[in-house]
Amino acid sequence: MLEPAIKYKDQLEKLQYDIWFNDKYKYWVCDVYYETMTINENTWSKHQFVSVIDDKVIGYIAYNVNRSDNSVDCLSVMNFTDDKMAFGMDLRQALKDIFEKYKFRKLNFCVVIGNPIEKSYDKMIKKYGGRIIGTKKEDVKLIDGEYYDKKIYEILATEYFDAIKNR
């Protein structure tokens, strides 16, 4: 179940510390260092949610809000468990809410190429009518000191609604 992240701030902070220096999560941090995640106390510039089962946080979903053009970007998705089914349902709900509940007109996001979630994002883009904008070569340096390419995606609300209507 999706809940506002601020309600589970303490639990979320502890979970993020557990993934520091864990190679499995190096793609999510997308940098050469770690810092404590900021949980905003408002929703003006960012929406932050947690995926919860039995009052236990299993994942984090957030995105930046651009009020000037009514779009969202920097989708941040982290599953702290191997429960792909429950977390996947909450991620689908978050994507649905972006267009149907909050009425944003566009979603932009990216993935570091090589991240295991990349294949799922490619499928998601096809499912919701989006597209791959392109690839930035050697765009990000991760904690392992290596440079990685980044793939950029977008989904327009009109394409999203066309895709779900034609399913």
Image (cartoon, grey):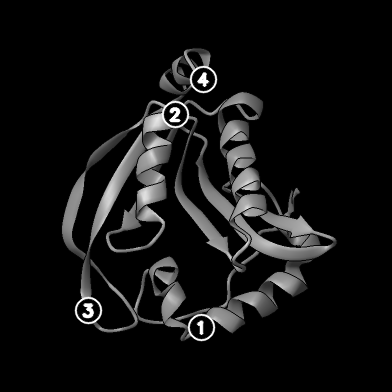
Which numbered disc, 1 or 2, marks the residue that appears first in the sequence? 1
| Residue 116 x %, y % | 38, 61
Q: Secondary structure at mark 4?
A: helix
**At numbered mark 2, what does the secondary structure look like: helix, strand or loop?**
loop
Real-space CA distance between mark 1 and mark 2, rounded to the nearest whole angstrom:
32 Å
Q: Amino acid at mark 1?
A: Trp
The x, y position of residue 73, in whole percent, is 44, 44
Q: Are marks 1 and 2 in contact (CB under 8 Å)?
A: no
Res. 39 visible in picture = yes
Disc sitting over residue 164 in the figure:
4
Marks 3 & 4, CB-CB < 8 Å contact: no
- Mark 4 or mark 2: whose residue is earlier in sequence: 2
Vertical comparison of 29 with 166: above or below: below
Of circles 2 and 3, the one toward us is 2
Q: Amino acid at mark 3?
A: Glu
Check disc 3 and report the residue beneath it.
146
Q: Which residue is mark 1?
A: 20
Q: Which residue position holds label 2? A: 128
Q: Residue at x 76, y 74 (%)?
A: 10
Question: Does residue 90 lie above or below 15 as drawn?
Answer: above
